[in-house]
Image (spheres, rainbow, N blue to C red):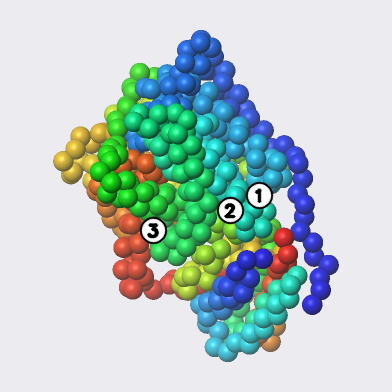
Amino acid sequence: MTTKLKRSPGTLRLYPHYRIMLLIYGLFLLVAFIVSTPGEIAAGLSRLITSRSVLISDYVAIGGIGATLVNAALVGLFTMTFLLLGKIRPNGSTIMGLFLSTGFAFFGKNIFNMLPITAGVWLFARVKKHPFRDMSLSAMLSATLCPVVSEFSFIPEVGQPLGAILGVGMGILIGFIFTPVSSSLLRAHSGFCLYNMGFAGGMIGSLIVSVIRGMGMKIETVLYWSSDYQLLFAALLYGLSLLLILCGFLDQAEPGETWRRFKKIHTHTGRLVTDYYHLYGNATYINMGVFCAFTTTLLLVLGGDLNGPTVGSILSITGFGAFGKHLRNATPLLAGAVLATYINQWDPMSPVNTLAILFSTCNAPIAGQFGWLWGIVAGFLHVSLAHWVGNLNGGLNLYNNGFTGGIVALVMVPVILSFYKRKEHSDGV
Amino acid sequence: MEFKFEKNLRIMNDLLAYCHNRGADTYHVDIALSTELSVCRIEARLERYPEAAVSQLLELLQTPRQHEVEDSFWGLSGDLDTDPELELIGMMVDEADVSYANGRLVIETRRLEST
């Protein structure tokens, strides 16, 4: 059996989405050099790179605002460069990946600790004789375990260069095994946890930590949490929302048609894989912008802090506005999560509670598929569980709420499915 | 291409689940695999299938091939019978045809296997 079909080699082109990202990174750099001197930025970057970077490491508290924004821009630009060189046309998953990579560069991912893991994914592709560009998503998202590289590289007792060799080696090993592990774990939650890589990272991180703790070494979580730049970050996030919404209307379609597409996004369950960018084009940016403004406002209304971790979280979930989330499937989760924070023993706006509220939306497909009531239950359980699972991997898994969300879906979905009756088809698919 | 057979089985599983959910009662399945190309073809007997559904199904199955998404998410295809991953199937195949006539729904997907 022969075919005339041929795989497209792709085009090395700065697609409109990449230009939007360049604008955002340019804005980050501009603000960084306005609020900090080059000397402060260089010293701050050095502190970020040599920090443990485990959860919760607010890079603003460790390296300063300027260094954090420069780090986010550098991480984003590096990630975008390998997408460009891979000639990858942007889609919902790459948009999500870029926003998520940029977001986590505010609290745990830096230009040093991301490289060995990316190299590990590249090595896996080489060994399997597979094009590296096909593994670009794994390369972007496996950075959930970046803190492992930092943790091992800067163990005071080991010293240099042995520490760096150990850290880089661990990073390469993690990158090498990450793709098959994350692929396999998808089936555990059937796509109802959008942060599958965080689920995989939690599993691998817990194994690593159990071995290390078994040898008598300690790996503990940390807490760096700033609250000095509320106004600046609010302006940045609302500015980003406005930019995204404007981009949404910069479409060849009529504004009425764009609005219709935006509303149509809300009819999807959001279960993996739902690529809004492919289905609805630039209207996706409106969804992302609205989501960004909504979560920022929610956090401010609840009295939360805008800092590295929360801004990073909002950027990440904004990215998922192109790949599964919308207000209709996310709001029940947020409601359940907020409810849990007022019932549990911690301050409602404690760091773990705050991040868990924002990231509880990783289970948005549960509300999208099974209804708002199950969404509230999932949000509630997510916050409750988030307080305990971080300790399993000693804060080494940056997408810890993905680990949490995976467990929530793993338990909830089979139970719901056993009573679930599919709705009758209308005239459509 | 790695997991060639598994991926094609999952594509077929999702297409079968889709037809089943639409009320099909009889199926005829063909899978042809070569080094270069895999073809999955399903014929399902369905009493009623609206015209709008043909174009919508075709639109989903003709989602451009996305190798990077396939690499990360192919494990989800053919997984949940209540909600087939039609868009993901579209990302995993290069060409698709859908037709409905005389109570028979025919779906064919073609997938380039060489990278």
- The answer to whether any part of residue A114 appears in the image is yes
Between A125 and A246, which is closer to the camera in this rendering? A125
Can you identify the residue that label 3 sits on? A366
Find residue A192 and report its horizontal and vertical position in percent.
42, 59
Q: Residues within 10 Å of mark 2 (few under 14, many from 20)?
A: many
The CA distance from mark 2 to mark 3 is 33 Å
The residue at which mark 1 appears reads as: A133
Vertical arrangement, residue A366 with respect to residue A391, above or below? below
Secondary structure of residue under mark 2: helix
Quick check: A24 above or below A213?
Answer: above
Q: What is the C-alpha distance between the residues marked 1 and 3?
A: 31 Å
Label 1 or label 2, whichever lies nearer to me, is 2
Between discs 1 and 3, the one toward the N terminus = 1
Q: Quadrant of residue A11?
A: top right
Give the residue at mark 2.
A124
Q: Quadrant of residue A338?
A: top left
Q: Disc 3 residue type?
A: Ile
Residue displayed at 59% across by 62% down: B87
Q: Residue at x 69, y 45 (%)?
A: A86
- Give SS at disc 3: helix
Residue A254 locus on image (x, y percent) = 67, 43
Q: Quadrant of residue B62?
A: bottom right
Which subunit holds the residue at mark 2?
Answer: A
Instruction: Give me the C-alpha separation between circle 1 and circle 2.
Output: 12 Å
Where residue A60 appears, as percent x and y from the top left, is 40, 23
- Please tell me if label 1 and label 3 are on a single chain: yes
CB within 8 Å, label 1 to label 2: no
Q: Amino acid at mark 2?
A: Phe
Q: Which chain letter matches label 1?
A: A
The quarter of the image holding the N terminus of chain A is bottom right
